[in-house]
Image (cartoon, grey):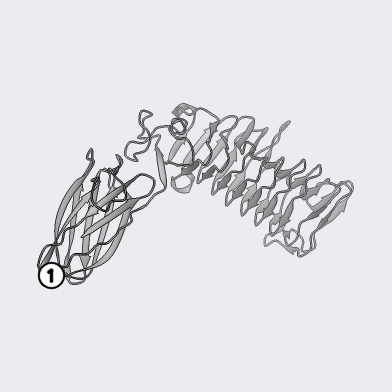
Amino acid sequence: MKKILMIPALAIFLLTAGCGGLSGDTAGTTAVTITVGKTGIAGAVSTTSAIPSAVASIRITVSADDMATVEKIVQVAGESSITVTLDILNGPDRHIVLEAMTASGTVLYRGETWVDLDGKALTITINLSATTTCRLYVDVNTGADDTDCSNPDTPCRTITYALTQTDGDEEICVEAGTYDSAAGERFPLTLKQGTSLKCRGDEYSTIISGGGTIIEGAAGASVEGCRLSINTASAAIYDNGAAITVNDCLIEGAGYDISGISLSADSTVSNSTIRNFQQGEVGGSGIIVSSGSPSITNNTITGNSYGIYVLNSSNPSVTGNTITDNRYGIYIVNSSAPVINNNILSCNTGVDLLNTTAGNINARSNQWDNSTPSEISGTCSLSGEDICNSGSGSVDYTGSTQAASPC
């Protein structure tokens, strides 16, 4: 029996098995010989196979309803290949599971198949898939900036260092803890093309805190699950003129004249909370859109001077957000033309939507403080109106309804 196991992006594991016993001997056992990482085996799809350094052990499990489960763990740290033989009781539906694990028992790769063993030779293929897409690991509590960050058991300490270990198009997984200048971080953290920064602490317990811009984007980069706290002027995240993705983040201000997210490309911001960005002489926006057509979807935007500030000739899509308790919910200036549909625009202390443009703004199917939004043209009192048209433009609020908790 010969099996070829393929591990995408890292290496190819080769598994061969020779079946013992007589042909058709269903009452006996099959001696299954498994070779992992060995090169030059007939039928192999690669001659450069080796066990990745992050893999410390291989666990082989064989089970079925009519037999006792067989499990074998083989230590492979420092080895380029290993061979192990298991005697498996003949019979139908033998479930074979292969797992490649780190020293702490984290399963990095897993594959499985079902086979019938009756003493006859056969060939099967098991494809091992990565159980995590992480390529680099960071842990401020246990890591050290003297590795290549590729092993979760020996992670880097700082995100700053991890970014020097990638050329892009890889996922950096960051464990819970506080990542700030005291921990060795240097800001801004400039992502590389396709870099995915994934914070893995529960309840936003992976905290990246600093002054000035915390994260600068690059084409195809993403930030997920992080808590970003910024305390001096600039924006916590700046897409840097490239389309990035920000998903499931908590982004909060801790001072004046700062903003949460600055967008100038076709970026995506979703499922995040952006709060407490207050204006002094400048800044104070939860999200500021200066160009492009970004997608702003399913976020909670609250406690800011400006929930979303749209300027220049940008055309964001603003959909499914809860925009409450800001001074201005959405502020539209210059020749920008956002599409604002299916949001909750309520309880913003000055005005829920302020349009200063000469255009007609599509703001259909939103929830307001009033089922028919209060609308003022010209000079507005900014005392809690739903809509203010201070320019020559207008707002199309067709399909409006009242918010569940209006003010």
User: Based on the displayed image, in which of its 4 quarters is residue 92 positioned?
Assistant: bottom left
Q: Secondary structure at mark 1?
A: loop
Residue 96, given in percent of the width and then of the height, sits at 24, 61
Q: Is residue 305 left or right of residue 209?
A: right
Residue 392, given in percent of the width and then of the height, sits at 89, 48
Q: Residues within 10 Å of mark 1 (few under 14, many from 20)?
A: few
Residue 53, given in percent of the width and then of the height, sits at 29, 39
**Viewer-nearest residue: 99 or 391:** 99
Residue at point 49% right, 31% down? 180
Residue at point 72% right, 32% down? 282
Residue at point 28% right, 49% down? 13
Disc 1 residue type (three-letter): Ser
Q: Is residue 198 left or right of residue 257?
A: left
Q: Residue reaching furthest front?
A: 42
Is 136 situated above or below 133?
above
Q: Is residue 155 left or right of residue 24?
A: right
Residue that mark 1 sits on: 23
Specify whether residue 392 is in view: yes
- Dividing the image into 4 quarters, which one contains the C terminus? bottom right
**Viewer-nearest residue: 304 or 147:** 147
- Dividing the image into 4 quarters, which one contains the N terminus? bottom left
Is 185 situated above or below 389?
above
Q: How many marks?
A: 1
**Viewer-nearest residue: 36 or 386:** 36
